C-alpha cells in the first residue's frame, strides 16, 4: 500500500479530474502487484507474508476458520492470474464489471468470461480440497 501511495504521489499529474480515485489507485496497486510477481517468478522465490509484530497465534476455533480461509486463498492462487484478478476485483473488491474491465484493460465480455471460468475452476478446486479433508478425517 505504501508503494502504491508513493507512486500515486509521484504521478499525481496522471490522475484525470472526474476519474474515480479508488479505481486509479487500484490500477496502480494492480500494476505494482504484477511487477512484484514478475520479480518473484524471475528469482524463483516463494512469495511469503511475514508475521506482523505482536500478531497473536490463533485459538482452535479461529484455526478452523483460518484453515478454511487458507484453502480459499490457496485455491485462488491455483487458478490463472487473469481469472484470479477478475474474480478478486469484482467479487472481493466490489468493482463493477465495467470498472474492473477498465482497470484490467480488457473488454467487459472478456472480464465476464474470466469470472465465470474462474468461479467454475475455483469451485472445482474447493470441492477437491473438501473431499481430501473428509477422506483424512474418515481414515483417522
Image: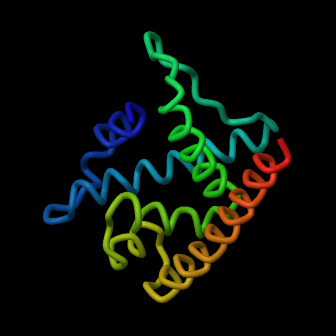
- The quadrant holding residue 82 is bottom right
Looking at the image, residue 55 sits to the left or right of residue 131; the answer is: left
Q: Residue furthest bottom?
A: 109
- Residue at left 32%, top 43%? 8
Q: Give the number of callouts.
A: 0
| Residue 100 position within the rendered picture, expressed as x and y whole percent measured from the top left | 39, 70
117 lies above or below 103 = below
Q: Nearer the viewer, residue 87 or 60?
A: 60
Residue 126 screen position, x and y as percent: 65, 62
Examine the rendered structure and indicate whether residue 58 appears above or below residue 117: above
Q: Position of residue 48 (x, y in %)?
A: 65, 31
Quarter placement of the C terminus: top right
User: Is residue 55 or residue 100 the one in the foreground?
Assistant: 55
Q: How is the image coloured?
A: rainbow
Residue pictured at 38% horizontal, 31% vertical: 2
Residue projecting furthest to the right: 139
Q: Position of residue 105 (x, y in %)?
A: 47, 73
Image quadrant for the N terminus? top left
Looking at the image, residue 43 lies above or below residue 34:
above
Q: Is residue 127 left or right of residue 13?
A: right
Tell whether 92 sits left or right of 68. left
Observer-nearest residue: 40 or 50? 50
Closer to the camera in the image, 109 or 90: 90
Look at 62% across and 77% down and name the residue there.
120
- Residue drawn where x is 50% and y is 41% of the image: 65
Can you name the residue that lies furthest to the left here? 18
Amino acid at each position: 500500500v505504501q508503494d502504491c501511495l508513493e507512486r500515486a504521489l509521484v504521478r499525481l499529474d496522471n490522475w484525470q479530474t472526474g476519474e474515480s480515485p479508488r479505481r486509479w489507485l487500484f490500477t496502480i496497486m494492480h500494476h505494482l502487484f504484477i511487477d512484484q510477481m514478475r520479480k518473484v517468478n524471475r528469482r524463483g522465490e516463494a512469495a511469503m507474508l511475514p508475521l506482523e509484530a505482536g500478531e497473536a497465534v490463533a485459538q482452535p476455533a479461529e484455526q478452523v476458520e483460518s484453515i478454511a480461509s487458507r484453502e480459499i486463498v490457496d485455491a485462488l492462487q491455483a487458478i490463472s492470474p487473469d481469472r484470479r484478478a477478475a474474480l478478486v476485483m469484482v467479487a472481493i473488491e466490489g468493482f463493477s464489471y465495467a470498472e474492473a474491465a477498465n482497470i484490467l484493460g480488457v473488454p467487459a465480455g472478456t472480464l465476464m468470461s474470466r469470472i465465470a471460468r474462474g468461479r467454475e475452476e475455483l469451485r472445482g478446486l474447493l470441492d477437491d480440497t473438501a473431499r481430501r479433508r473428509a477422506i483424512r478425517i474418515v481414515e483417522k
